[in-house]
Amino acid sequence: MDRLEDERFAKKIMSAAQQGKKAEVDHLIKSIGLKAFIITRFTPTGVIYELSTHPNSSSPVSCCTLTVSMKWGT
């Protein structure tokens, strides 16, 4: 969360998302070093990240999900 709070980093994400550059947004988020599985979605007002545990052979369904929403602007 500290990295997402960094204004320069957040503006990079916002700019890429507003231009529809999903691969760049995904790359920026993965550069944070998260080990969770991440799904990124854009809306006209922001970006939404769903972070979840990786399913495995003993647990084929992810047990936990954290949703983070970033709204554009102030």
Image (spheres, helix red, strand yellow):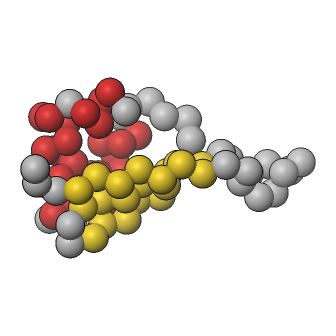
Which of the 4 quarters of the picture holds residue 1?
top left
Residue 10, x across and y down, in percent? 20, 42
Q: Is residue 64 above or below residue 20?
A: above
Horizontal relation, residue 54 to residue 6: left or right: right
Outermost residue toward the front?
Answer: 74
Residue 23 in view (yes/no): no
Residue at left 32%, top 27%?
2
Residue 19 in view (yes/no): yes
Q: Nearer the viewer, residue 64 or 9?
A: 64
Residue at left 37%, top 59%?
48
Residue at left 71%, top 54%?
62
Horizontal relation, residue 12 to residue 24: left or right: left
Q: Is residue 44 above or below residue 55?
A: below
Outermost residue toward the bottom?
Answer: 44
Residue 57, x across and y down, in percent? 86, 50
Residue 59, x across and y down, in percent? 84, 51
Horizontal relation, residue 16 to residue 34: left or right: left
Residue at left 35%, top 54%?
69
Horizontal relation, residue 13 to residue 52: left or right: left
Q: Is residue 53 above or below residue 32?
A: below
Residue 66, x across and y down, in percent? 54, 48
